[in-house]
Amino acid sequence: MLPSEAAGSLLFAKLAATITAIYADLAGIDNLIAEQLKNHKDAEILMIMPRFGPYLTAKFLAQIGGTLDAFDSADKLASLAGLAPVPRDSGRISGNLHRPRRFNRRLLRTCYLAALSSLKSSPTSRAFYDRKRAEGKTHKQALLALARRRINVIWAMLRDHTPYIEPEQPLPIAA
């Protein structure tokens, strides 16, 4: 047995106990978030959206202030998230669109993660993403376009208080 082996095993045991305690704390926080979401009127509607679980639902609701009252349209919500392009025209140059400089980066990240995870379980999201990729968009551009589209769907769901229903996929046209 090496002289440092006993000290190493003691240190390892302490680190393992600390990590176990951290995991227990995180589980408690996750349960608290889930309990708080049960009291929110829009949480159940949002959690029906594919891959929009309790964590992303809580983050989304926190970033928009809990309700859509501050937003007149889906475009305003998308603008806050940085998903609506704004013009950077000058003189005779027009149609030069870019991401706004001021937007809620946390809301953008929430929408981006929701779009990314929806590719796994939602055929509609996957078809939209694949179509954007076929148009020549990069992975990031296609995901941002998908996130923008999902903002429109979320807006309609929360405005009308209706759950998400996955649209039927049209059959591919034979060549």
Image (tube, rainbow, N blue to C red):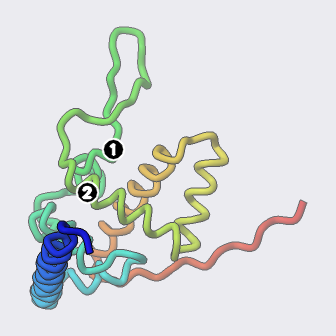
Whole-percent x and y of residue 94? 42, 19
Taking the image as shown, residue 60 lies to the left or right of residue 169, namely left
Whole-percent x and y of residue 130? 62, 56
Placement of 89 over or under 160, stated as above or below = above
Residue located 32% across and 59% down the image:
111
Residue located 55% across and 77% down the image:
167
Dividing the picture into quadrants, the one containing residue 67 is bottom left
Q: How many marks?
A: 2
Taking the image as shown, residue 18 lies to the left or right of residue 82, namely left
- Within-10-Å neighbours for mark 1: few <14, some 14–19, many 20+: many
What amino acid type is highlighted by mark number 2? Answer: Ser
Dividing the picture into quadrants, the one containing residue 92 is top left
Placement of 50 over or under 88, stated as above or below = below
Can residue 95 be seen here? The reply is yes
Residue located 56% across and 70% down the image:
124
Residue located 38% across and 78% down the image:
49
Q: Secondary structure at mark 1?
A: loop
Whole-percent x and y of residue 14? 11, 77
Dot 1 or dot 2: first in sequence order is: 2
Placement of 54 over or under 150, stated as above or below = below
Disc number for residue 73: 2
Front-most of residues 21 and 28: 21
Q: Which residue is mark 1?
A: 84
